[in-house]
Structure formats: structure tokens, C-alpha cells
Image: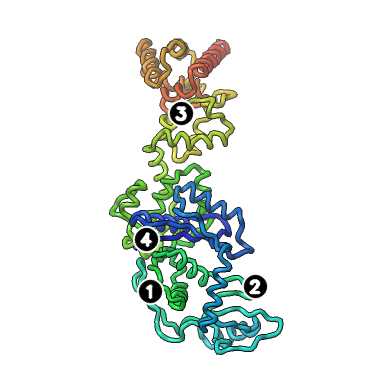
Amino acid sequence: MTVRTRFAPSPTGYLHIGGARTALFCWLYARRHGGTFVLRIEDTDRERSTEASVQVILDAMEWLQMQPDEEPVYQTDRFDRYGEIIEQLLAQDKAYPCYCSRERLDQLREQQQAAGIKPRYDGHCRGGSRPVDGVTPVIRFASPLSGEVLVEDLVHGRTVFTNDELDDLIIRRSDGHPTYNFTVVVDDIDMEITHVIRGDDHLNNTPRQINIYHALGATPPQFAHLPMILGSDGSRLSKRHGAVNVLEYRDQGFLADALLNYLVRLGWSHGDQEVFSRKEMVALFDLADVNKAASRFNDEKLTWLNQQYIKHGDPDELGAQLVPFLQALGFDSASGPDPADIVRVQHDRVATLAEMAEASRFIYESFDEFDPKAAKKHLRPVIREALADVRARLADLADWTADEINAAIHASAESLELKMGKVAQPIRVAVTGGPVSPSIDGTVYLVGRETAVARLDRALAFIDARSAAER
């Protein structure tokens, strides 16, 4: 058997964190077993489904690098197929038209609730009912009246449902649109899906769907229902817990691999290991290791994990991903150093690419004035000779590299019998305008020879003006 999994989002908004985790588990299971991962867009809700939402889902899947192995399937392209299967069920007396009015159904529900009975359709039209003038009937599935449905769930284990708890669900509305529990069965049969991996909020739908599989003479796939993702406070994950839209994390400078690494650990584990490459995830993932209990989403843990990926990631790849964040701040990355060099200098100081771009302002922007406290402390007459010496050495460097810059600053400090820290911090204030930046050799290297020399000249002029004012 060739494993075939599917991710089937509804395009009524963005791709949220829970959906991305479901997609990841589907993708991993297919990859682990050498199978096929497919994407189905469940867009039958014509009022809420939009092309923009479809594009958001496709963009998110592309960013996460979990593109499907086949062209996406759109349910709105399959209405003729759904109609064909409904006619087949009607012909076999496995479905029937229902003319019950909304008023009758509301009254029935009120009576059942008053009697303490679980609300359900009573099968009024099941034995055949007369057409009602001017009324387009819904089509209901004739659910088995007795027996049980056994669900051998790959996460939750065996769950038994009795058919007398299930009513005759609507499979086509009066407006002609097929319903979810019906379309997913037809789609999964036609797409030859072997494993349905989805959130456990769908578990109660499963016995209804299994009955439809049997009515169509098909073998149901294996099911795996994943636990919910909760917020850090234990409540349902929502925007108040932070970003829940996958693309918001992209826009905040998180890495796709870091997000997937974090998501795979929400409900799945492999010993105490925290950091996984994609290759490791594929090799190790098993539905048998998915927990039944809900997981809690923790932004701080995700941020820490993202920082690890930035620290240990490939500078060239990260540099390419950094460019859009530099551009968003109005910086022309082509006018500065190689973005990969920025990563090499900044990688252990930031948690996201957005932070890295912001922390690199000193490379692309000049500053109107020095930080007052930093200038008062470090740009003093006593340091003028050292800064002038460093300025001359940097201007004459044959090779503009961080190592050569470091050697030049060390040589200057030694020649003047100063500790490195006594020289480095004034250089930092002179070159960046403030007291905080990466390593001094990396900082000077990134701004470039011409800018570094010009900013040192500016600092020397500032010191001279300060000396004149003090005399």
C-alpha cells in the first residue's frame, strides 16, 4: 500500500498554527513512508471562501516548504461528482429527500431538549414523503438504525459509537451545495487517501463518515486525530496569545524550519531531543508517539528555538532571507556588505531576522548625534590619540577583513599601552553613535572602510570641540 495523506484546509481566513501542525504531521507521515502528500482546498462555503484566503494558504505552504506532491484539488471543481454520488445513493435508497420545514425542526429540537434528549433528526421523511410545492428539499443520508461504528484511531485508540446516537445527516442543502461530511468522504475515496490525519475536533464526525464509506462500498482510511493546541494559559489558542497566523511569524522574522521544529514538538516527542532537522523529523516521526493530551503553545520557547536556528544556520541562506527585512526598513542591501557577513557578525545577538535587520541600522544609516551618555563617557580628550591612531591604521589597511581590523585595533592599543576595552568602546560609539553593537572588529568591518574612517573623523572633531569648550 502506498501511503497517501492529505491536508484539507478551508479558505475562510489565514493558515493558523493548528492547521500548520496538521499539515506538518500529514507531510511527515507521507515522507516517512515514501508516500504522497496532497492538498485539498475545501472551498464549498461560497460565502466565506475567498481567492485571497486560498492564496494565503498556498503562500504559507510554500514558505514552510511543504508543497504538495500533486496539483491542489478544489472542491468547487467537483460539484458534478458530488451530484453523481448523491443520485447513486438516492437510487439505492441510501439517501432521501427531506421536506421538513425549519419551523418543524426547531419545534422538534425544543421538545427533545425539554425532555432531556440529545437533539437529532427523527427520520420523519425517511420512509418517503410527499413533495411540498415551492420547497426544494435537502437530501439526507439514511444512516444505519442499529449496530456500532468502531474507530481504531492511531492516536486515541479504539472508540465505539452506536448508530442510534447518529441521525440522518444532510448531505446536500436546499441550495444544492453538498455538505462537509459527505464531500470529504467522496474526495478521500477518489483521491485514494490511506490516512486521514486531522484535529481531534473532527473525531465525532468520523462515525458518520465511516457509514458513508460503507454505503459507497469503500474501505475507510485509517484515522489519526491530533490533540488541540492551547494557549500558554490553557485556554483555546487565539490572537490574544500572540500570532496565530503562520505568515505573521514569517513577517516577524521567524524561520520556517524553526517554526516546524517547534510545531512537531507540540504533541510529539522523541526522547528529550528539542532540535530536529527536517531530515531527522522525517526519519523519526511516528503517529504512535503522538500524545493524546492537548499541547500548550509558548512563544518564548519558539523564540528561543528560532534563535538556535539563527545561531547555527548557514550564513548564506540566512543572508538571503535577511534581505527583505533590510528592504522593509528602507535599506538597499546591495549598497552595504554581503548580507551573509551581517549574519556572521550578528547571529548570536538576535532572535529573529527582523531584530537582525533593526540591529544593523548603523551599517546603512548615519546618525544625527552621538548618544549623550555614551559620548560623555567615552569620547573624551584622553582617548583622542588612540582614536586618531586607529583611524590611520584602518585607512591604510591592505585587506579590509575583520581579522585585519582586529589586528590593527590591537596593535594600536598595545602601542599606546591601553587595554583593548579602553579602545574598543570609544571606537564603537564613534562608528555607531551608541554603546551597543556586535564585536568591534565585526562592527567596523560591516560599515566599510570609507564610512568607518569618516565616522572616526567625526568623533575626533567632536572631541576637539569638547576640549575647546572645556578650556
Mark 3 vs mark 1, foreground winner is 1
**Of helix, strand and loop, which one carries label 3?**
loop
Say which residue label 4 marks.
Answer: 3
Amino acid found under the numbered disc labelled 1: Val
Say which residue label 1 marks.
Answer: 151
Query: In the image, is residue 401 above or below residue 152?
Result: above
How crowded pointer 3 is (Cα within 10 Å; few <14, some 14-19, many 20+) is rated as: many
Say which residue label 2 marks.
Answer: 175
Q: Residue at image x 38%, y 54%?
A: 264
Considering only order in the chain, which callout, 2 or 4, is on the residue closer to the N terminus?
4
Residue 362 image position (x, y, % from top left): 52, 27
Query: In the image, is residue 50 above or below residue 324?
Result: below
- Mark 3–mark 4 CB contact (< 8 Å): no
How crowded pointer 4 is (Cα within 10 Å; few <14, some 14-19, many 20+) is rated as: some
Amino acid found under the numbered disc labelled 2: Asp
Say which residue label 3 marks.
Answer: 437
How many angstroms separate mark 3 from mark 1 (CA)?
A: 59 Å
**Of helix, strand and loop, which one carries label 1?**
strand
Mark 3 vs mark 2, foreground winner is 2
